[in-house]
Amino acid sequence: MSRVPPVVFDELTPEGQEIYKQIAGPREGAVGGPYTVWLRTPEIADIFNKVGDVLRVRGKLTKKLQELMVLVLSREWNCQYQWVVHEAAARSNGLSDDTIEAIRNGKKPNLTADDERAVYDVVTELIATKALSDATYQRALAVLGLDILIELVTNSGRYTQAAMVINAFQVPVPGDAKPLPAI
């Protein structure tokens, strides 16, 4: 059960209602996940939505690489909600079942593409060491370029923040699913 009541559109302030509409628009009318918490403070919801639009809609990081990043972070944070919302997108954007299952089970996937390895290495090294070694940074820079590397690191922080909010406020998982095993 969520620690925050569901968002009721008619109970939001006019500013909150406008931001709700902006969030719901590209999401087929649905507002879920951390936005159900952030909408309690519309300015927070608005800022995260704008940052998300820059990274998700106008960013240069491919959908496949973005979904790889999200799955790695979802696994790290044991964020069932993020996993449920992003697993199908990861698959439909070209991540293999073997890659998805390895990440689900806390294993290193057998990635053959340089860009996938770069994303995986950057995200997992940031998780493990809270920094990037020069070697990992230089490999990622050579493969991804500076703009995409900036997007990757920024988006990793954004999804980490979202996972923290989702987990802290026990945002309900669609269908009460629990696709991530304890590891």
Image (cartoon, rainbow, N blue to C red):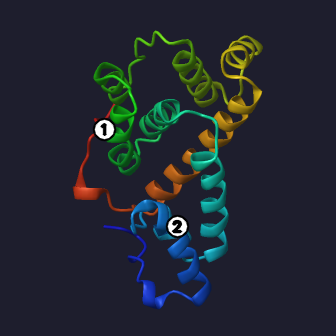
Q: Name which residue lies at 28% across and 35% down.
A: 181
- In the image, residue 167 sits, relative to residue 6, either above or below, namely above
Q: Residues within 10 Å of mark 2 (few under 14, many from 20)?
A: many
Specify which label sits upstream in the sequence, 2 or 1.
Answer: 2
Q: Quadrant of the rendered structure where residue 140 is? A: top right
Callout 2 amino acid: Ile
- In the image, residue 94 sits, relative to residue 15, either above or below, namely above
Q: Which residue is mark 1?
A: 180
Q: Name which residue lies at 34% across and 21% down.
A: 102
Q: Name which residue lies at 50% across and 12% down.
A: 113
Label 2, label 1: how far apart the Cα atoms are? 27 Å
Is residue 158 visible to us here? no
Q: Which residue is mark 2?
A: 23
**Residue 108, percent across and down?**
42, 17
- Which element is circle 2 on? helix
Q: Quick one: quadrant of the C terminus?
A: top left
Callout 1 amino acid: Leu
